[in-house]
Image: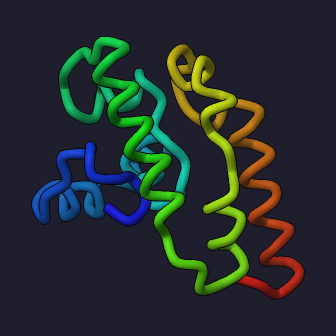
Amino acid sequence: IKDQGMALPFTRGFHLVSQLVGAMNPNDLDAMDESVPFTKTTLDNLLGIEHNEESYKHYFVHFQRAQQARPVQVASDRIKKNVDWGRSYQEFLSAPVAKQIPAVQAFQEQLKQQQVRGGR
């Protein structure tokens, strides 16, 4: 919930299944804790329903709120808190997986650079 927000129907069972099969699904289940919103396609596949834009927007807005509310405990938390995913909303609507979105690639590179500098 810290990473994905209150709009994702998250249960202990969902978490356990995600942990068990996450390595086989690195673009969705394994990506849940990476502070990147799911694309609409990924969310549809994960939950087994076709979201309309209104329901996907609900998830996306709550994801952003969760990121804004996260406490800054380490340097990478500041990066996660300050990223503006809203500018890439249309790409999240249409891309099959988040790793294909340039803003996600830049975000992941920024986190890598932070780790290299010694922050977490």
**In this view of the protein, which residue sits in the foreground, 4 or 27?**
4
Image quarter (top left, top right, bottom left or bottom right) of the C terminus: bottom right
Report which quarter residue 119 is drawn in.
bottom right
Picture mark count: 0
Chosen colour scheme: rainbow
Where residue 117 appears, as percent x and y from the top left, is 89, 81
Res 97 → quadrant: top right
In this rendering, is residue 6 above or below 88?
Answer: below
Q: Residue at x 35, y 53 (%)?
A: 5
Residue 18: image location, x then y, percent: 27, 56
Kindly indicate the quadrant of the structure image that contains residue 103: top right
Q: Nearer the viewer, residue 56 or 104?
A: 56
Residue 33 location (% of width, % of height): 45, 61
Identify which residue is drawn at 35% across, 25% down. Answer: 56
Estimate the x, y position of residue 111 in percent, counting from the top left. 75, 64
Work out which quarter of the rendered image holds the N terminus and state it: bottom left
Left or right for 65, reference 105: left
Q: Residue at coordinates 43% horizontally, 47% vertically from top-left?
A: 63
Q: Which residue is drawn at the image coordinates 10% and 60% (left, top)? A: 13
- Relative to 35, is 115 above or below? below
